[in-house]
Amino acid sequence: MNGEAWKRLRKTADSISDMSIRGAGKIARAAANALADLARDWDGQSPEDLLADISKAASILHETRPSAVSLRNGILLTLRDVEKQDSIDGMKELLMMRSDEFISSSHLALEKISQFGAKRIRKGSTVLTHCNSSAALSVIYQAFKDGRVDEVYSTESRPWRQGHITARWLAEREVPVTMIVDSAVRHFMNDMDIVCVGADTITANGAVINKIGTSQLALAAHEARTPFIVCAETYKFSMETLMGSLVEIEDRGPKEVADPLEPDDFPGVRFKNPVFDVTPPEYINSIVTEMGVISPYMATEIIRGMFQITGPISMERGNEDHKWFREM
Amino acid sequence: MNGEAWKRLRKTADSISDMSIRGAGKIARAAANALADLARDWDGQSPEDLLADISKAASILHETRPSAVSLRNGILLTLRDVEKQDSIDGMKELLMMRSDEFISSSHLALEKISQFGAKRIRKGSTVLTHCNSSAALSVIYQAFKDGRVDEVYSTESRPWRQGHITARWLAEREVPVTMIVDSAVRHFMNDMDIVCVGADTITANGAVINKIGTSQLALAAHEARTPFIVCAETYKFSMETLMGSLVEIEDRGPKEVADPLEPDDFPGVRFKNPVFDVTPPEYINSIVTEMGVISPYMATEIIRGMFQITGPISMERGNEDHKWFREM
Amino acid sequence: MNGEAWKRLRKTADSISDMSIRGAGKIARAAANALADLARDWDGQSPEDLLADISKAASILHETRPSAVSLRNGILLTLRDVEKQDSIDGMKELLMMRSDEFISSSHLALEKISQFGAKRIRKGSTVLTHCNSSAALSVIYQAFKDGRVDEVYSTESRPWRQGHITARWLAEREVPVTMIVDSAVRHFMNDMDIVCVGADTITANGAVINKIGTSQLALAAHEARTPFIVCAETYKFSMETLMGSLVEIEDRGPKEVADPLEPDDFPGVRFKNPVFDVTPPEYINSIVTEMGVISPYMATEIIRGMFQITGPISMERGNEDHKWFREM
Amino acid sequence: MNGEAWKRLRKTADSISDMSIRGAGKIARAAANALADLARDWDGQSPEDLLADISKAASILHETRPSAVSLRNGILLTLRDVEKQDSIDGMKELLMMRSDEFISSSHLALEKISQFGAKRIRKGSTVLTHCNSSAALSVIYQAFKDGRVDEVYSTESRPWRQGHITARWLAEREVPVTMIVDSAVRHFMNDMDIVCVGADTITANGAVINKIGTSQLALAAHEARTPFIVCAETYKFSMETLMGSLVEIEDRGPKEVADPLEPDDFPGVRFKNPVFDVTPPEYINSIVTEMGVISPYMATEIIRGMFQITGPISMERGNEDHKWFREM
Amino acid sequence: MNGEAWKRLRKTADSISDMSIRGAGKIARAAANALADLARDWDGQSPEDLLADISKAASILHETRPSAVSLRNGILLTLRDVEKQDSIDGMKELLMMRSDEFISSSHLALEKISQFGAKRIRKGSTVLTHCNSSAALSVIYQAFKDGRVDEVYSTESRPWRQGHITARWLAEREVPVTMIVDSAVRHFMNDMDIVCVGADTITANGAVINKIGTSQLALAAHEARTPFIVCAETYKFSMETLMGSLVEIEDRGPKEVADPLEPDDFPGVRFKNPVFDVTPPEYINSIVTEMGVISPYMATEIIRGMFQITGPISMERGNEDHKWFREM
Amino acid sequence: MNGEAWKRLRKTADSISDMSIRGAGKIARAAANALADLARDWDGQSPEDLLADISKAASILHETRPSAVSLRNGILLTLRDVEKQDSIDGMKELLMMRSDEFISSSHLALEKISQFGAKRIRKGSTVLTHCNSSAALSVIYQAFKDGRVDEVYSTESRPWRQGHITARWLAEREVPVTMIVDSAVRHFMNDMDIVCVGADTITANGAVINKIGTSQLALAAHEARTPFIVCAETYKFSMETLMGSLVEIEDRGPKEVADPLEPDDFPGVRFKNPVFDVTPPEYINSIVTEMGVISPYMATEIIRGMFQITGPISMERGNEDHKWFREM
C-alpha cells in the first residue's frame, strides 16, 4: 500500500493547517504537489478506487483552510478532467501533468503580473499601497526598476502592521518609502498618482476581498479621481461566489487590537477584528492578472479562463466543481 | 392535414393574447409546447414545407405579445438549429427535444435562483421588495426558511398594487411583512439590509426593465449603500437590445391611476401610466440567474450562454435570430 | 370675568384640534386672533395675572397640535416682548398689534412668495409638483400666468392622493396638467425643467420636512441636475430644531394604505404610514420665502429674521421661547 | 511693581507650553484667568501703560501654543472692548468681568452641547466615535442616560490610540462599547446609525479640522447616508480663517508611528505623522454648539456670535483682532 | 442750471454704454463719481427736486448696462440713506461722502482679496485659471510673490480668448504659465492643486455666474477633489436674485464663434454663444471677498454686509432698493 | 524577384506616413490590401522565406503609425493563422482571403453601426456630438432619416475645429445644426437628450480614448443623467492594453493653440496640446459596434470577437500577436 504517500499528504495538510506553509500561492502549490505525489505512488486496483482516494485526499487538503480560495482552485485545477480518463495510468499521468502545469503557471503568473502592471504606472508616480501583497509589490518594484516610481507610501495596516514588512522590503531595495497610519489615507490621497494593492479573493461580480482597510483606500481614491488597481493571480478568483456564496470574513479576536503591552486592561470593552473588507467593483479601475489587465466586471470570464471552459456560462459548472469534495 | 394541431396552436396563441395564459415563464412554456405539438402531428411532404410551417407558427405565437422577451426567447430556444437538420424526422425530433429542454430548464431555473439568491442575504436581514416577482419571492422565502430573513418590507406598487399580493403571500407563509406606500421607500431605506426585486427584461448593456418604481428603489439603495439585487431567469435577457433596440415601455392609460370610485372626475387632467422603468446597471450589485450570480455588465455573456453560443460575439447572430419571424 | 373670551378661545382650540380649522397658515392665524381676542376683553387686576392668563391661553392653543411649527410660531410672534411692557394696557395693546401684524404679514407672505418664486421658472418649463401645497401652487400658477409654464406634472401623492386636488385645481385654471403615480417620478425626471414643492417644517440646518415622497423627488432631481425649489412662509421654520430637537414624524396607521374597499383583508400584514419625510439641504437649490429666495443653509438666519433678532446667534434664545408654554 | 503677578502669568504660560495644562478648554480658561489676575494686581500709572502690559501678557500667553484656536479666542474674548474704557479702573473691571464670563460660559457650553446633541440621536442607536473628544462623549453619554444609545463603536485612533481612553471611559459608565481598528470604519459603517465626533478647529467656510482619520469617517458616513455630527464649543471656531489663513497641520514625527518596541528598526523608511485632517462641510450634517445645532455653513455666523458682533460682516474685524498680539 | 454737470454725467453714461469705460469695478466707480459730481454742482431749490434729479441720474446710469450688478451696486451704495437727510446740504454731503467711500473701498477690496486669497494657495502649487479676472490674477500673483505658486495653467477661454491676455500678463511678470484649450481642462485636472477664478455676478443662494466654461472647470475640479475658489469684490453680489430674479445670460451671436477668416462660410448652421454660465455653490470651496473668505452659502450675509444692514433679513429691503430706479 | 510589389508596398507605407492616406478605416484597409498584393506576386522558394517577408512587410506598414490601433489590427487580422499553413500556396491564399475579409467587413461595419446606433436615439431628440467622427455621424444621420432627430449640437472642437466640418456636413444634409464653443457644453447639457461621439481607441477595461474634450462631455452628461454613447468599429479596440500598455497621448505642440494670426506673439508662454483624452467606462452607457450595442465593460470580449478567439482569455494571446512585428 501507499501508506507513505498518505503520510506525506497528511503532513502537508498539517503544515497548511498550522500555518508553517502559508501564503495564497504556497498553499495551493503544496496541495497540487501532494496530490501528484499521492497519484505517483498509488498502487490500487481500479480506476474507481483511485478516484475515491483522490477525492479523499482533495477533501483532506481542502479542509485545512476551507475558505482559502487559492487552495480550492489549486486542487480543482490539478484534478480537472482526471475523472474522464479510462485507465489508472491515464488518470495518474493527467493528474501529474496538471499538477506540474498549475505549479509552473503559478510561478509564471507573478512575473506576468509584474510586467503588465508596471506599465500602468506613469513615469514620476507616487504610489500608495496597503498591507503586504507580493503581487502588488512585484508590480511596484518592476515599475521602480523601469524608472516610473518616484516614491511609495505604505500604510501601517493595523492590526498586524504588515506595512512594516512592506516598508522594510522596499527600503532594502532602495525604493523611497514613507509610512503613514491607516487613518491618514484620505489626508494624503491628493498627493498620490495611483493606488496599487493585492487581493485575497475576487468574487464573480468583481468585488475584491482584501485586508481590512482596502475599501477605505478605494473609496478615498475614487473621491479624488486617483486610479486604483488590484494585482492578483487568477487563482484568487472564486467560482463559489458565482453560485451565490458570500465570502465569510473571519474575526480574529481582541488580542491583536488591544495594546500588546496590557492586553487585559480593557474590562467591559468588546473588540471586533475583521481580517478583510469588501471593495466594490465601481471603485476599481483595473485588475492586473496574468491573463491581462481587465475590468473587475470581467471576473466571471477570468474564472472561465482559469478552468479553460470554452463554452458559455452554464448551470452545470458549479456542481461539477463540488464533486471532489463531496466525500468528506 | 394537421388542421387540429393548427387549431390548438391558435388556441394557445389566443390564450396568450387575452391574458388567460400570463406570466413570463408560463407564456414561454406554452409557446414551446405548442410548437412541439404542431411538429409532432405535422404530416407534410418536404423539409422546406415543415420549416415554412414552423416559421408561420412561430410568427403567430410571437405576434400575441411581440414585446414579451420571454416569449420570443422561448420560441427561439425551441427552434434552435432545427433548420440544420436534413430530414423531416430529424427536424421534428430536435424541435420536440428542444421544447422539452426549454420547459424543464425553465422550471429548474427558479429553483436554482432561489438557492443562489438566498445565499446573498445575510442572517438577520430586513429585505425590501417591490411589486410581485416570483423569482424575487422565491429567493426571499428560501432565505427566510434558511433563517436569514427577519422581516420583509413590501411596497404597495401603484397603480396595480401588486404589493398587496406579495404581502398576503408572505403573511400566509408566516414571514413578518410590512407594507409601505411607494413614496416611503427612501424614508425607510436606512433600515433595510438588502433590496431584492425581479425583472421583466434585461438589456445587453445590463439595464433592468421592471415594474415602474424599481429604478427609484435602486437609486435610493445606491444613495444609502444598501445592496440591490435582481432575480431573473435567463430568458428575461433580450438579444434584440444587443442589436440596438430600445425596450418600448407601454403606457396603460388613465383608468388605473384615476380613483376607481370616480374615474371620470378629472376634467382636463391628462394621465401618464408607464408600466415599467429602466434601472441602470450602476445601481445593481448582482443579477441572480440560474447560470450564477453575476454583474449586470455580464448580460451579453448570459445571452450567449442562453443560446449556447460558443464563439465570440459576432455580427451574424442578430440576423439569424430574426429568421423565424420574417415570414409574417 | 371674561368668561366669554375664554369660551371663544377654547372653541378655537377645539376647532384646531378636530381639524375643522386646518392648514399651516389658518391655524396659526386663528391662534393669533384668539389671543388678541382674549387680551381685548381681559379685565383682571395685575400685569402678573394677565401674563399668567396669556401663558395659559398660549399653552391651551399650543397643545391642540403640539408638533405644528406654524401654530407655535404664530403664538410666539403674537406674544413677542409682551412681558416687557409695564402696564396692563401696554401689554394688551402690544399683543393686539402683534396679532394683527402676524395675520396680515402671513397673508402678504403668500403673495410675495408667488412673485419671487415665479421668477425662478424659465419660459417654456415643465414643472413637477408633489402633494398639494398652496405656496408651491401659487408660485406655479403665477409663473403660468406670466407665460413661463407649459405643463405641470402632479404626483398622485399616496396615501391621501392630494395630487388629485392639485390636478383638479390646476385644470380648473386651464393649466395643462398630467398626473402620474408616485413611483413614476424618476422615469419622467429627465423631461422636467424644475421641481417645485411646499414644506411642512424647515429645520435650523436647512432640511425640509414635507409630505412623504418629497425626498425621493429631490433625490431624483439631484441625480438628473433638475433644479428643486421649496416654497414656504417663514413661519414654517422651526427654532426648536436649533436647540437640537428632531422633528417627530407621525405614523398615521394602516387604514390609508390598505385598500379602502377591503380594509380588513390583510391578516398578518403590518403597515407603516409615515406622513412626512426629510429632504436634506444638499438636494435643495433654493427655498422661496417672503423674505427672499435663499439657500437652505440660511435657515438659521430666516429664524432670526422671523423673530427680528438683531444680534448674533446666542445661547439664551431657546429658553426664552419656551417660557410661554411652561405653565401647562 | 506687580512682579509677582507677572511671575504667575509666566508660570501659567510655561504650564501651557509644557502641556501640564492641556485640552482646548483648559488652556483657554487658564489664559483668561491669568490675564484677570494680572489686571487685578496691576499698579501702573496710565491707561496706556496698562494696555501695553495687557498686550504683552496676551502675546506671551498666545505664543505658548500659537496655533491653538481656543487659546487665541479665550484671550480675545477676555480683552474685548477693554481698550474702549477711559480709566484704569474701568479697564481692570471690564477685563476681570470678561474673564469671568468666558470661564463660566465655557463651563456652561459643554452642558448645553450635551443637551442639544443628545436629542439628535434616535432611540436604539449605535453610535460611532473617533479619538477622545469630551464634547462628543458628553453628547453620547447624555443620550445613553436618556435611553437612546444601544451601543458605541470607538476607533483605536492611531497613532496615539486615544480610542483606548474613550473605550475605558464608556465602559466604566456601563455604556456597551466595541473597539475597532481605524481601517475597519467603512466595513462597519452600514451598522452605524450616527457618527459623532469632536473638533479641534472649525474654519470660516465650515470645514472641521480634527484628529487624523476624521475625514475618512465622514467620507464613509456620507457614502452610506449615515448622519455625521460634530460637537464643538464656539471657541473652536477660527476667525483667522475668515481672513484666508489655512490651518497648519502639525507633523509629529516618526516615533508615534514606528513600533514602540523597536523604534529604530526602520532603516531608510520615512514617516509622515500629521495630527489632524480636514473634513469638508459637505460631509457634515450638523455642528452641535452651545449656541445651537447648526449647518457647518453657518460657521461665520457662529464666529460673529462668539464675539457678539451685531453688524454685518465687515472688512475691519480681522485687523482689530490682531491688535493685541502686535507687540510681540 | 447745472447743465454742465448733466452733460458730464451723460458723457460718463455714454462711455459706459459704448464700452470705452469697462470692467466691473471701473464702471461702478465711474457711476459713483458721476453722481457725486452732479450733486456737488446741483443748484436747485428743494430737497424733493434734488431727490428727483438724483433718481433721474441714477436711472440714466443704470440703463447703460442694466444687467451689470457692479454698476447697480455702485449706484445704490452711493445713494444709501441720502433720502433720509432733511436738507439739501445734508443730502449733497452724504452723497459725496458715500461716493468717496465706495470708490476707495473698491480700490481697497482688490488688495484685501489678494492678501486673503494668496493664503489659500499652498506652497508649491500649480494653479488653473480661466478667462482673465483681475481679482483671480491678483490672488495668484500675490501667491507667486509669496513663493507659493510653481506654475499657472490658463485656459484659452474661447470665444474671446481672454486666456491670451492672462497668459501674457503672467509671462510678463515671470510667472511660469502654460496655455491649454478649454476642452483639455479635465485632462490636466489631476495635475492641478487649486483652481482660482473670478466672478461676474454672485447670487443670493451662492451660485457664481462667470465666463462660459467656468462651471466645467468647477465640475472637473469637484470630480478630482481639487479645491475651487472664486475671487470677487462684494459689489459682484446681487440683491436682485434674493428677490427671485434669475440672472439673464447674454448670447453674443455667431461672429465670435465662426472662423474669423471666413465668417460667412456656414450656410444653414446656427450658432449659440452664451457669455456666461452658472456654477452651483456645491462645487465652490470658498469665495474670497474683501470681507473675508467665506462659504458660497453665506452670499446673503455678504449682501447684507455690503449695504451694512444690521437687522435680520426682511421683506422690505428689496423694494427699497428699487426706489432709485422707478422714475425712468 | 517581386521588386515591384515591394515598391508598391513601400509607397502605401509612405502614403500612410505622410497622411495622404488617413482615417482609421482607410489606413487599415490600405495595409491589408498592400499585404495581399505582396503575397499575390511573391515568387520565393520556401514557406519560411514567405513568412519572413510577410513579417518584414507587416513591420514596415506598422511603423508608419505605430500608435494607430486600427492599422495594427488590420495587419493582425490579415495575417491571422497564415503561419499555420503548410504550403506557400496555402499561405498566399489564406492571406489574400483574410485581406478581402477585413476590407469588406470594415465597410460593412459602418453600415451596421448606423443601423444599431440609430435605434438608441428616441424620437424628437436633440443630440450633442463632438469633433468629426464618421461612425457617430452615420448614426446621427441615420436617426435623422428615421425621423428621430430634431436637432444636433456640434462643439467647435478646438484646436483643429473639426466641429466646423461636422456642422457643414450636417447642414448640407439639411439636419438642423447648432454650433457651440467647447466650454459651453455643460451650459447646454440639460437641453440635450443624448450625446453621441466616436472613438480613436478603446482599451481592454472599457475606457475610450478620443479627441480632447470628450471626457468633459461625458462628465457633464453623467452629471445630468443624459445618455452618452460611443460609436466605434471593433478594430478600434486595443489588445495591447490588455497586456497593460497605457495609450500614449500625443502632444501636437503650440501652433494649433496659439492665435494663427500671430503665432509668435507669446513670449514666455508654454503650450500643452494633447490630442486625446480618456473617458472612463463609468460615464459611458453603451458602445455601438458592428457586433452589437454593448456595455464598455465588455471590451475584452469584443477584442476576442474581433480575432475570433473561441476559448477563454489566456496568457498566451498577447505574445502571439507580437510575433509579426518582432523582426523590425
Image: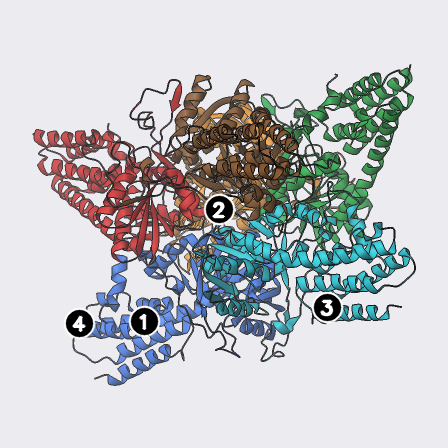
Chain colours: A red, B orange, C green, D brown, E cyan, F blue
Q: Mark 1 and mark 4, same subunit?
A: yes
Q: Position of residue F41 (x, y in %)?
A: 26, 81
Left or right: E57, with B168 as reference point: right
* SS type, badge 4: helix
Check disc 4: other Cα within 10 Å, few if <14, some if 14-19, many if 20+.
few
Left or right: F160, with D308 as reference point: left
Q: Are marks 3 and 2 in contact (CB under 8 Å)?
A: no
Q: Earlier in the sequence, mark 1 or mark 4?
A: 4
Instruction: Name the foreground residue: B185 vs B30.
Output: B185
Task: Identify residue for label 2.
Answer: B282
* SS type, badge 2: helix
Check disc 3: other Cα within 10 Å, few if <14, some if 14-19, many if 20+.
many
Quadrant of the frame with the C terminus of chain C: top right
Closest to the camera, between mark 4 and mark 3, is 3
Q: Position of residue E203 (x, y in %)?
A: 67, 52
Q: Position of residue E258 (x, y in %)?
A: 60, 74
Is residue A59 visible to us here?
Answer: yes
Q: Which mark is residue F97?
A: 1
| Marked residue chain, label 3 | E
Task: Identify residue for label 4.
Answer: F48
